[in-house]
Image: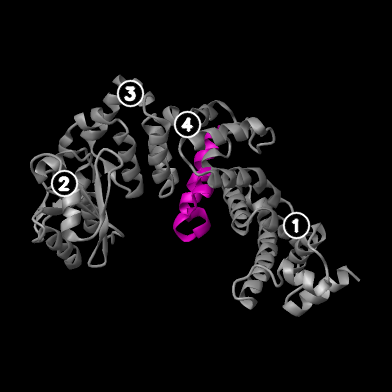
Amino acid sequence: MRNYLDVLTKIEETGAKTWLVGDTVRMLEMGIQPEIITLAIDSDDMYAVSQALGTGTVDARGPFPALRGEILGVPFRAFGLRGGSIEEDLACRDLSIEAIAIRSDGGVVDPFGGRFDIRNGVIRLTGDNVDLIEADPLRILRMLRFAAEFEMDIFWKTETDVRKFLDVHADRMKDIPAERWGREIMKGLIRRPYSFIELCDDYDLIPFFLKDLYDLNNIPDGRKNGISLYEHTLNVLKVIEARFDTNRLMQSEAFVLAGLFKYVGTKTLDGSDRGKHSERLITDYMTQWNVTSETVSDVIEIITHFNKVYSPVTEEDFCKNVLQFSTKGVEVAVEFAKCVAEAEGFVNDVSDTLENNHWNLKQVLRRFNHVKLQTEGASRYMTGREVMTLLHMKPGKRVGELLEGLDMAVGTGKVNSRSSAERWLKEQTA
């Protein structure tokens, strides 16, 4: 805390009163170390503050210009004070746990009981003011995101006011642009995917941002006394969330989105009727949410290929997959298959196959990593130019074929050193 207060003091030497606010104070109260601190500055001219500090740049994009920089080794972002006082500024913030400020002398400004709500695990609209929701209905999704992430309860009056607003103003939710939905959805999914979507379901929000997921409520899984494909989606997300904190692969956007979209665009549990229409549907949603094209491709790849690992996969096939897609993509597909098997209740039937496949994949990846260790990070034992020199060849298609074949030989354990790579290449051209 001392270092943060020193940052405030440094800025106030320019003549601008400054406070720690928002997510920074909330995180400090929760015992979380913020990577970047958020400040409110009593100044209408961020450029003047930046000039006086001799550091930082002003980002004028968006409704509130922000001064971004680093002081005393601490990265910060600073916004102008809204209203005539810090209390008025805090009143504009949507949740009480975000409406707390700290002065440079260490004093706390908490007019809406945010610290009390943090201690008691409660999410509450700042000042119980429903006008905050009416000003920006997307704050409802932000409220649910915080409740899911921090496992907090929504205060009864806030819940009542929000549900009443949704009953009366559903049209306001429909008017929210897809990219704004996307920003909050992605933040919720990447932290607590099941809890977040379950809360969105409880507040009947899913039809507003992912109608094709909600419509899966009407599609049974085809089993006797079965459940809907929508419930299967929640089960997959529940398994992912349970393993979330201990599995780095599951913490990627692509993994979680694959769980969310696995059944979208299909009417069968195994996705056997999935086709180009389904892929376009999934792609359209994620594109509207401003998900990167690379992540979209990864999601489609996972959903399309994970079923293959329920049958035995040879090291050679895994090697082909790694070279065609990516190491991480193949690893994720195997982990995703495990989650789906557990969620759909057939994990015992395929556990031996999955474990054998996982072992085969690890051997392939170990061999590729061995190349990097021996070559100081290079992906191959030999470059195309070195191959041409060794074999007295000219540039052409054949060189590329030899390099691809060499990769396969490495992945399957036939080549494990520079010298064995040279021998293998000579054998191919003998």
Q: Which residue is mark 4?
A: 210
Q: Is residue 46 above or below residue 164?
A: below
**Which residue is most to the right?**
430
Q: Earlier in the sequence, mark 2 or mark 4?
A: 2
Q: What's the residue at 78%, 62% (across, down)?
A: 395
- In percent of width and height, residue 354 lies at 67, 56
Q: Which residues are magenta?
A: 228-257
Q: Describe residue 332's horizontal placement relative to residue 102 as left or right.
A: right
Check the picture and name the quadrant holding the N terminus. bottom left
Q: Describe residue 253's horizontal placement relative to residue 163 as left or right.
A: right
Q: Earlier in the sequence, mark 1 or mark 2?
A: 2
Q: Which residue is mark 1?
A: 317
How far is disc 1 from disc 2 in space, using C-alphas?
61 Å
What type is the residue that disc 3 sits on? Answer: Arg
Q: Earlier in the sequence, mark 1 or mark 3?
A: 3
Q: Is residue 195 magenta?
A: no
Residue 313, by quadrant, is bottom right
- In percent of width and height, residue 18 lies at 13, 54
Viewer-nearest of labels 3 and 2? 2
What type is the residue that disc 1 sits on? Answer: Asp
Whether residues under marks 1 and 3 lie with C-beta atoms below 8 angstroms apart, the answer is no
Q: Which residue is mark 2?
A: 45
How far is disc 2 from disc 4 in space, using C-alphas?
41 Å
Residue 381, by quadrant, is bottom right
Q: Can I make out residue 18 in this image?
A: yes
